[in-house]
Amino acid sequence: MLNHDFRRFLAPLDELNPAQIEEAQTKTRDLRRRSEAISEIKTRTNQEHKCPFRGDERRQKWGRTRTKVQRYRCSGCKKTC
């Protein structure tokens, strides 16, 4: 998001009632947890190049998850992770 778009997003926050503020905090917390989880998964994937099922190091890219995380397919057991 561009800086000026972000500033326009922040401007109406002063007009929120307490229930809306709580809802915005909950949504923000959920988004942060999701992005941290995705970062952790990507970090582990880049560090660990073995199949979690068989331990084989031969793998190939195999699409992406709904959250756009790279999936891999083990060349040995054909399972995806």
Image (tube, grey):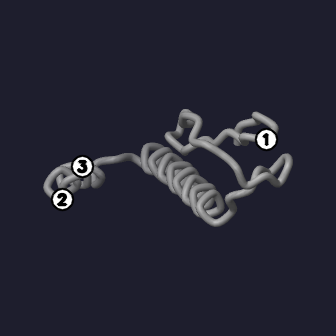
Q: Is residue 20 left or right of residue 37?
A: left
**What residue is shown with label 1?**
76
Q: Secondary structure at mark 2?
A: helix
Q: Nearer the viewer, residue 47 or 37?
A: 47
Disc 1 to disc 3, how far (Cα)? Answer: 49 Å
**What residue is shown with label 2?**
3
Q: Are marks 2 and 3 in contact (CB under 8 Å)?
A: no
Could you tell me which residue is drawn at 43 percent across and 44 percent down? 20
Could you tell me which residue is drawn at 39 percent across and 46 percent down? 17
- Seen as rendered, the residue at the extreme right is 54
Q: Is residue 81 left or right of residue 70?
A: right
Q: Is residue 34 left or right of residue 73?
A: left
Residue type highlighted by circle 1: Gly
Could you tell me which residue is drawn at 66 percent across and 46 percent down? 59
Could you tell me how many numbered marks the image carries? 3
Residue 70 sits in quarter: top right
**What residue is shown with label 3?**
9
